[in-house]
Amino acid sequence: MKKIKVMKLLKWFIVLTMVLCICSGFVVAGKGYSMYRNALDQMSLADKVESIQDKEHYTTFEELPEVYVNAVVSVEDHRFYNHPGIDLIAIGRAVFNDLRAGRFVEGGSTITQQLAKNLYFSQEKEMTRKAAEVFMAFDLERNYSKEEILELYVNTIYYGDGYYTVADASEGYFGKAPEEMSKYESTLLAGIPNAPSRYAPTKNPVLAEKRQMQVLRRMEDCGYFSTEEAETVAAQMVAIH
């Protein structure tokens, strides 16, 4: 009899928890939508994108080395070309890891979501902002191609050492334009935005190369490089300015 009562209580506890989670989700989504609308009221998406494209040293998709593009997609969002702006698998994994750690340790953000954040929102890990980010990501995917989104992304992320565009970073670190970067330079640069202060090659060259190895392994996993090709790239050396 006691066992039946305990099971009933457990069942009701689970149901109540699910209801509370759903209600909380609606509240967060509502607040996130308001934040998203307020952001667009300040400046439309088209105007925001145009303001980025008009900046000095803006790099087009055609000017990006193929290896660099593949490296960024592999390490940041390997389902980029297949999802509609959010990656439910990545979000599920991030939620599980965050709950297990009891704090935000993984964001699960796609390249599109990161672009939305860079264009309109703060860098703080906050649920309402994450919800607003999702609405903006859907907007970006509706209005721009994957190539345009990736192009905007590499022109708005931080690469360390005060470099906020791929052109500034390639010129600053390697003394050359993005289209001139070697495979070694492309894969090294692709790993920096994950933690710019940690992976900037001028500050922590050993950590930067360790991160580069992670990028190369992800490129292997995604089929962009064979093991031999990755090892050849890793063996190259370049001068960092």
Image: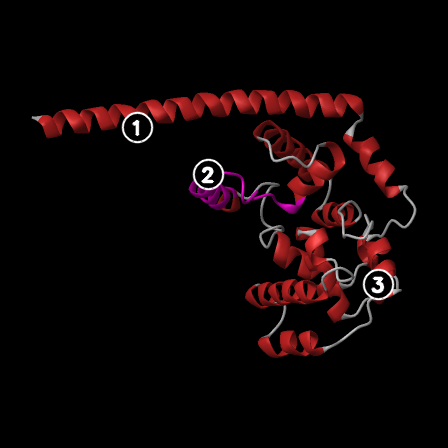
Residue 129: x %, y % from top left: 63, 30
Residue 31: x %, y % from top left: 60, 21
Query: What separation in Å lies between label 2 and label 1 (alpha carbons)?
Result: 19 Å
Is 176 drawn above or below residue 103 in the view shown?
A: below
**Mark seen at residue 179:** 3
Picture colour scheme: secondary structure
Q: Are marks 2 and 1 in contact (CB under 8 Å)?
A: no
**Mark seen at residue 14:** 1
Task: Determine whether the residue tagged by mark 3 lies in a helix, strand or loop.
Answer: helix
Q: Which residue is drawn at the image coordinates 70% and 48% (left, top)? A: 146
The answer to which of marks 2 and 1 sits earlier in the sequence is: 1
Task: Determine whether the residue tagged by mark 1 lies in a helix, strand or loop.
Answer: helix
Image quarter where the C terminus lies is bottom right
Query: What separation in Å lies between label 3 and label 1 (alpha carbons)?
Result: 55 Å
* Residue designated by label 2: 102
Apparent side of residue 20 relative to residue 146 in the rendered image (left or right) = left
